[in-house]
Amino acid sequence: MNHDGTPVDPVRSDSSSSPFPSPSRGRAAEPSPASLRAPEFPGRFARTRRFSLGIPRQITVSPDGDRILFLRGTGGTDPVSRLWLYSGGRERMLADPVALAVAEDGTPDEERARRERAREASTGVVAYATDAAVRLAAFALGGRLWTVAPHGSAAPRPLATAGPVTDPRPSPDGRWIAYVTGGALHAVRADGSEDRVLAAPEGPDVVYGLAEYAAAESMGRTRGHWWSPASDALLVARVDTAPVGRRWVGDPADPDTPPRPVPYPAAGTANARVSLHLLRLDGERVAVRLPEHARAAVHPPGAWTDTAFEYVTDAGWDGHGPRAQVQTRDQRTAVLLAVDPADGTTTPVHTEHDPAWVELVPGVPGRTAAGTPVTAVVTDDGRRALRVGDAIAPPGQQLREVLAVDGERVWFTAQEDPTEVHVWCHSPEAGFVRVSEGPGVHHVWTGGGTTVLESWTESGHRFTVRREGAPESRIRVTAEEPAVVPRPQLLTLGARELRSHLYLPSWYEPGSGPLPVLLNPYAGPGMQLVVRARTWWGCVSQWFAEQGFAVLVTDGRGTPGRGPAWEKAVHGDRLAPALEDQIDALHAAAADHPFLDLGAVAIRGWSFGGYLAAGAVLHHPEVFHAAVAGGTPTDRRLYDTHWEERFLGHPEVFPEAYRRSSLLPYAGRLSRPLLLVHGLADDNVYVAHTLRLSSALLAAGRQHSVLPLAGAGHRVTRQEQVAGLLRYEVAFLKKSLNF
């Protein structure tokens, strides 16, 4: 219902809605196969969880190269994830939750929260861990601990534990399994005997062995305990959330279920207190002596300076012992520390400073087996490159991630073209060598001379297994084919050479008339949409095109792939540069494609894309004529410390930056149709964001529409909601643009 009290027109079903625009906006040719299949798309998109079901993931290669473990369902619509073994060119299912008949209602809240942070779309075996030799795998299912031996034929067996299990991890020698229950870290022998408490919480706000919210959501650290290579001790995070404000998450559509508290560190408020401890199996405990502050003499200055090391951004063990990386509250200094396992003292190994923020690149800094430093450096030409000892990656590469350090070999991904991600390997003998070929987004797992190369290309997904001296083979992908296959034009637009995709209806004849334009961006940090690969968001864009739109997708400033200066152009203002790039791309595309109707322009998006969409109609109604904004962070003060302060600093020091980057102060400017969509159970971008914007719009007398999604988190997974939302958006946009 609109906020003026009038109902929104009901959305027509796929069978009755036409993908063709009215004659005044263009002339349709004979229906193409793509347009005829378009009505099938929303339902298939929902059933397949964005076409993700049936794609292998969480791949592990054994050190001898003989065994490859991975997760996958049985088909493209099967939401139950199974554990599989690939060996000798054959696949074998190791663990089938359906056959084990384990109910999901035993899953503890800690595990549900971990899955939400990981945006997990499946049920069943959604995570596992192995010993060093990959001869024992452990996983949690329905709150119980299960183990299975990949090299044998025995069925999975449950182990008795002290309570519901989260994040079980075998020791490297396979004799023990560490797990978390009730905030305590336990270790149990792999045969189920001798369950012992290694660390028990000292109060209701303390948890051992799990990542806190900010680490899992904003830093990329999803773990909280790490085994020593000798299997005699663990490095463990202790998290105390007592200083952190509580938010209460519930579902108003289910009033019988009480809301649950979530410790959420909003921008400018207290963080969780995180410390590290070395816990030995014999009961000895050593506190790691993390430094409290960065050296003020070398820390970059700023209007807001906070040198306290409040963040543990990474931790673990390598061949040289335990290590940890810490970062200051203002994120301008990060230090890699070597930890002495005897007394917990620490020694700085590598220090980074940045006047804006130190970007956390997965896998660096690190060390090879011989101790050669593996770091990321910003070169004279402004790129972020990998450095191994004195060797620096070839010119033009933008480092994305270090995937593995295998002896003296360093495997990593990098970009030379912003629309492609390739796998590289550095070794002392060969130097830097590119491993992947052909346009696409590539990834690799390796062990014992075996590599599994994932290639995400314009024709689909494949996983190629290569073993030294053996012919290559494939791990099967059982995902369904989309009902609509994307067919984008890759464009480079404007003075900033913005990479864009333009999707047109398959039935459209150029020159036959104008097409309304739909911008469909994300355009935020950490994610690119314009890549040379067939993606679920590309399928969605093509489906919208089949409804009669010309769909434009642009990666602007703030997105990865084009170097630190490009990423940090949004420092101090999260909205204006991103919007400027969308507008510049639109006008440049229209100059080259005059059939794009600049008199009928809409924008849609989710999360940061939703923020951009709502901001577009508030700030630039002369350009944008309608918007759909989903999961939208409207008030930047409501988002978490590590993420928001990275871009905007402390809200008490930079209140104008938060005002400039938030949407609430500009609610009175709305003059275009705006649909706000939000999951009521979202614990990342809370529904309070949308409710506050709606209240501000109502107070300003601005008509708008709100669509609440019962029970939905930040990632909407219910089939009826996913499919219905796509259809609803089309109806809203067509009505708003009068076609």
Image (cartoon, rainbow, N blue to C red):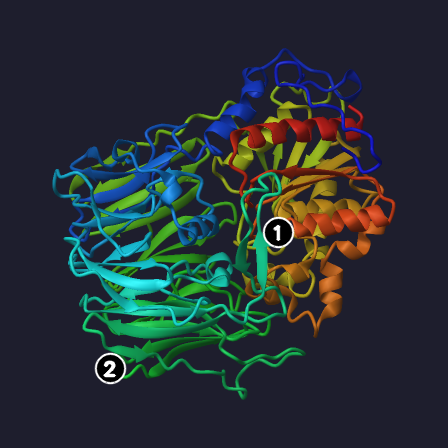
Camera-side mark, 2 or 1:
1
Res. 356 image quadrant: bottom right
Spot occupied by residue 67 in the image (x, y as percentages of width and height): 19, 44
State how many labels appear.
Answer: 2
Q: Give the Cα separation between the discs numbered 2 and 1.
A: 44 Å
Query: Which quarter of the rendering shows the C terminus?
Result: top right
Q: Is residue 645 above or below residue 592?
A: below
Q: For this rendering, which residue is in front, 332 or 40?
A: 40
* Residue 374 can be seen in this image: no
Q: Is residue 61 left or right of residue 251?
A: left
Res. 456 image quadrant: top left
Spot occupied by residue 393 in the image (x, y as percentages of width and height): 40, 62
* Residue 442 can be seen in this image: yes
The residue wearing badge 2 is: 342
Spot occupied by residue 367 in the image (x, y as percentages of width and height): 31, 69
Say what amino acid the circle numbered 1 marks: Tyr
Spot occupied by residue 99 in the image (x, y as percentages of width and height): 26, 31
Which residue occupies 53% across, 50% down? 527
Secondary structure of the residue carrying numbered label 2: loop
Name, please, the residue furthest toward the right: 701
Which residue occupies 47% across, 52% down? 117
Instruction: Give neighbour class at mark 1: few <14, some 14-19, many 20+ (Cα, 10 Å).
Output: many
Secondary structure of the residue carrying numbered label 1: loop
Res. 22 image quadrant: top right
Q: Is residue 256 above or below residue 725?
A: below
